[in-house]
Amino acid sequence: MKKEKEYNLPVDYNSLAAGERKKVRQQYIQQQEGKCFYSGESLESPPPIRITDLEIDWSLFPKGFLNAPIHLQHDHGTGLTEGAVHGYCNAVMWEYEGR
């Protein structure tokens, strides 16, 4: 059986192909023991109410932004990946914290 490639985290998000992003996201999920990098809550559950109660200007995000429930968060300045997050947490991080 072929072993999945392990990435030396963090990695440059912008240099990853879509399939590689998925593998890196999965690696973060495993490393984070299934918890959201931002909220600390389980990625198998919806984001916590303290997050979803925050108002988001959805016009700032691409159509279908929340279609994927788990996102690979990266620093927009350095391009380096930070962890796996709920999609809504990703929006909060960007809109409220500029991340």
Image: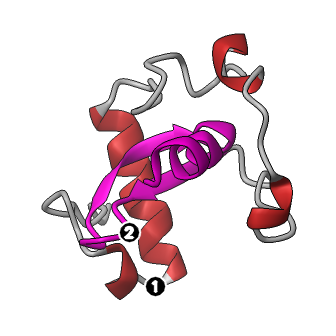
- The CA distance from mark 2 to mark 1 is 17 Å
What type is the residue that disc 2 sits on? Answer: His
Quarter of the rendering containing residue 74: bottom left
Quarter of the rendering containing residue 29: top left
First in sequence: mark 2 vs mark 1: 1
**Residue 87 vs residue 12: left or right?**
right
Question: What residue is at 46 percent from the left and 84 percent from the top?
Answer: 17
Q: Residues within 10 Å of mark 2 (few under 14, many from 20)?
A: few
Q: Which labelled disc corresponds to residue 82?
A: none
**Residue 53 vs residue 23: left or right?**
right
Color scheme of the displayed model: secondary structure
Span colored in magenta = 70-99
Residue receiving disc 1: 17
Quarter of the rendering containing residue 42: top right
Whether the magenta-drawn stretch holds residue 56 is answered as no
Q: Nearer the viewer, residue 61 or 11?
A: 61
Q: Residues within 10 Å of mark 1 (few under 14, many from 20)?
A: few
Question: What residue is at 38 percent from the left and 82 percent from the top?
Answer: 14
Residue receiving disc 2: 76
